[in-house]
Image: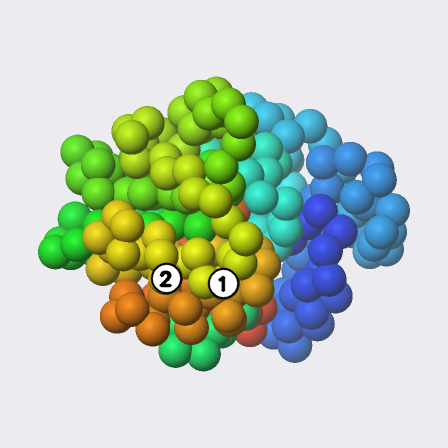
Amino acid sequence: MIMILSDGGANTAEVEKQLKLHGDEYCLFFSDVISASRYAKGNVLIGMATRWSMAKVYAENNITAVIDITETPDSKLSRAALLACSKNIKYVKCVRCEAVEGAKSCLSYKQLADRIKNSKGNALIYARPETVSEISRLAGEFSSKIYVVLPKDIVFDVDRALKYSIPLLNVIEMDITDEKESVALAVEKVGAGMVIFSAETEEVEEKATSARSVGAEVIVTHSMGVEYPKIFSNVRDAVIEIHT
């Protein structure tokens, strides 16, 4: 039995379609009634988002694989489901990460961390604190090469800065009037050889162009805040991986 892990996002119907083409038995799992109500049909399970409750659900329903299509960043359900998987349960994550002209796509935070370790310059990241924190954790001692930029405020927000899990001095405040132009200025200010944008970054196309204009490599990643063992940007590839 294959489990579709969902929070009611748009990919639910597409995953069902692909599994039906393969003749697979499947069920849907939601952590709450509100999410389930967005897609209330078929074999639906609702339960608590904890590691132990998910492990129990896997055992009771003979789950052999999980396709996680939750769209909520840093989802408790997603984390619990991943932790509950044994070596006999394949876990595949599907995320939305649109291609950006002139930018490379990298869905693995581990690979991003390795690139940062081996780069000559620093890395400037535009993403949620949870995403930066996970990349920083994987970069280890090389997290000192990671920088983020925040709009200048009257008082420096230390609590917010600490959430990025990088040295406080690497959280740079700038007077931002034109966000697109500020990217190029920030690249030069911190000596960045690469700029990493998460998928939800506003005006990412224009900001990527600004970064490239000063010679920085541009990379786009997902915004889930979790490093997944198998991750894809489209449903078809995720379903193929389940059958590999």
Depth check, front residue: 38 or 90: 38
Q: Is residue 153 left or right of residue 108?
A: right
Question: Which residue: 30% across, 36% down?
Answer: 170
Depth check, front residue: 201 or 78: 201
Residue under pointer 2 = 184
Q: Amino acid at mark 2?
A: Ala
Determine the CA span between mark 2 and mark 1: 8 Å
Question: Which residue: 78% across, 35% down?
Answer: 32
Dot 2 falls on a residue whose secondary structure is helix
Q: Amino acid at mark 1?
A: Lys
Depth check, front residue: 62 or 192: 192
Q: Position of residue 159 (x, y in %)?
A: 48, 20
Residue under pointer 1 = 180
Question: Which residue: 24% across, 37% down?
Answer: 143
Q: Position of residue 204 (x, y in %)?
A: 52, 65
Q: Is residue 135 left or right of residue 220?
A: left
The image shows residue 170, relative to residue 211, as above or below, that is above
Depth check, front residue: 30 or 195: 195
Q: Is residue 139 left or right of residue 204?
A: left
Q: Position of residue 42 (x, y in %)?
A: 82, 56
Please name the colour scheme applied to the rendered image: rainbow
Locate the C terminus by quadrant. Answer: bottom left
Q: Quadrant of residue 209?
A: bottom left
Residue 95 in view of the camera: no
Question: Which residue: 38% across, 72% down?
Answer: 103
